[in-house]
Amino acid sequence: MASNERSIDYATIEMLDKAENDGVGTAFGRAASMKPCPIGGEGSCCKMCAMGPCRLPSAKNRSETAQQRDERRGVCGATIETIAARNFVRMIAGGTAAHSDHGRSVAHTFLAAAKGEDSNFSIVDEQKLLQVALDFGIAIEGRSARDIAIDVGEAAIEEFGKTHGTLRFLNRAPLKRQQIWKEQEVEPRSIDREVVESMHRTTMGVDMDYEHLFQQGTRTALADGWGGSMLATELQDIMLGTPVPVRGKVNLGVLRPDTVNIIVHGHEPLLPEMLVVACQDPELIALAKAKGAEGGINLGGICCSANEVLMRHGVPLAGNMLQQELAVVSGAVESMVVDVQCVMQSLPKVAECYHTEIVTTSSRAKIAGAVHIDFDESKPLEAAREIVRRAINRYPMRQKALVNIPQHSMDLVAGFSHETINYLLGGLFRASYRPLNENIINGRIRGVAGVVGCSNPRVKHDDAHAKLVRELIKNDVLVIQTGCAAMACAKLGLMTPEAAHLHAGPGLAEVCEAVGIPPVLHMGACVDNSRILMAATAMVKEGGLGDDLSDLPVAGAAPEWMSEKAIAIGQYFVASGVYTVFGVSWPTLGSEEVTRWLFEGMGAIYGGRWAFEPDPEKMARLMIDHIDSKRKALGLDKARERVLFDMEMRRELEAV
Ligand code: SF4
Ligand code: MSK
């Protein structure tokens, strides 16, 4: 397959061609040569015990009687419904474990920082500390920030393994939503417990009623969104600063010639924060220059580590998940520093062809062929300085003949935390979601869409993100993004204020131009999907758009998802009342009954439901139709007609 059929991104296309010339294999090539297993892909393969694996091909294209169908079971008698549900719940458990283990390490570092133990971190955002303390029911009156922070840190750590009650952040949701969770008995009790119970209930011979399994899956996903992920986001903000709008650059063109290039990749922002400090150290810059790197040291990022340091420091984004190998292929990266999640095991293999050193830093993740420098959370700056020094020492090994930095990069504005949206729209002294709600009510903004998730070589890289988001903003839907999806759209210039008049419908463009924001807002990393929950909750609490998250004219999507984390995120959005559409493939298609339950049954219970649509234009239509149905239910369809059903405006819109 030609490179331009694999990606719409010019930098990626150039590096894929270079990889081929250099004889380097990448995920794109492996995906093309390895056909996915159709039975596993539909969620119908069970390998929970050694009587199997049991593969139950889907009933599609089969003419079988109900009895024959009923007899199609695993060795233990498990039905296709049970197998599909168990696999799905295990994906949720995996995703929740990943986000939440990240949250746990942040909580431990937070507590150490609060206590003033030997740590390079401190309490930066006191206002947010007080807010979290209030949500946790911790007294703040007349107490020092230090004492409050210690209580918050201890309470946060407790959330992972407490033996009584339910998660504290559930009380942030609208009251009606809390009531639904209570009635459905899906309030998470503690984060670890829900992951463990999901693993228990999906093992051989335990829970064999798919609806009952999904109840546990939902409870586990809520432990992610309103638990582990939300804790990670909030504690990081208190320690590292709540993001505010910041200009940055994105794509492999941010790598620099004659400069030591270091890439951070993964998810946890604590070491990258220290790398930001180390890369500015005059002594290390002087050392880099002494080694011949006249440009000094350049830090960039891949995946969510990148999003974190972009939002707080303007560190450039080198690219999204599928560009990790390609950054090395540029021949201009001295060191790629990885921690956890979305890291490819092929990196050391790719690095063998160049001079790049792959450095693992988490005690939870090592890769054969990489160097391991443990990120000791009590001495993080020391680890960061060692990593930078090693990168500098590799610069003289750079092989000029193998260097080719693609000349593609794009400006963007990032850092739209939900607090920032509050200030930007309402002003510093009357911060509020009122202007956003009013613009939705008067129809200038049709609704809000969260477009998140990964990149996946099973589909054309960045293509679905681009088509979906362009269609949404053209139809006056404000888009908020996190993760690799955010980078895909940033590379196209959709995260610049100028994108409003170039690509947005007239109503959305008017609002964006008045406030000076892009029509597509970068809200951060994958754990920061919790910011989207908070923004949606703020919209409900502001009033005028119903009294629950499921009343809002909003929708979610992950058009190029690949990770178990995406399934956990989708499930907590659906269980929070949000209509959520996924592309690529759907992991329960082997069971019509289970799929129907997720696509329709959940809607009846939670007001949010799943949908699957790989075509991005059809996906946009589904989301816009859903938004319009919510507008109608709120009685806002008339208001919108006044604004948009003007023919001249329509013609202008079509011409964009
Ligand atoms: Fe097969 Fe049942 Fe074992 Fe799964 S648990 S592998 S369906 S025997
Ligand atoms: S990094 S989970 S590929 S969004 Fe958060 Fe990107 Fe998906 Fe990883």
Image: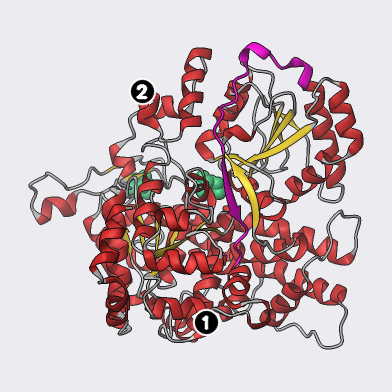
Is 532 on the left or on the right of 302, as rendered? left
Give me the residue at 38% from left, 80% from top.
442
Residue topped by disc 1: 434
Circle 2 SS class: loop
In terms of image quadrants, where is residue 235? bottom right
In terms of image quadrants, where is residue 652? bottom left
Find out whether residue 86 is within the magenta segment: no
Residue topped by disc 2: 2
Q: Nearer the viewer, mark 2 or mark 1?
A: 1
In terms of image quadrants, where is residue 86? bottom left
Q: Amino acid at mark 2?
A: Ala
Residue 355 on image: x %, y %: 69, 19
Residue 426 on image: x %, y %: 59, 78
**Of the numbered discs in the image, which one, if any, rests on residue 210?**
none
Residue 62 on image: x %, y %: 11, 45
| Residue 217 appears in the picture as rendered | no
Above or below 186: residue 245: above
* Stretch in magenta: 395-417
Q: Nearer the viewer, residue 573 or 205?
A: 573
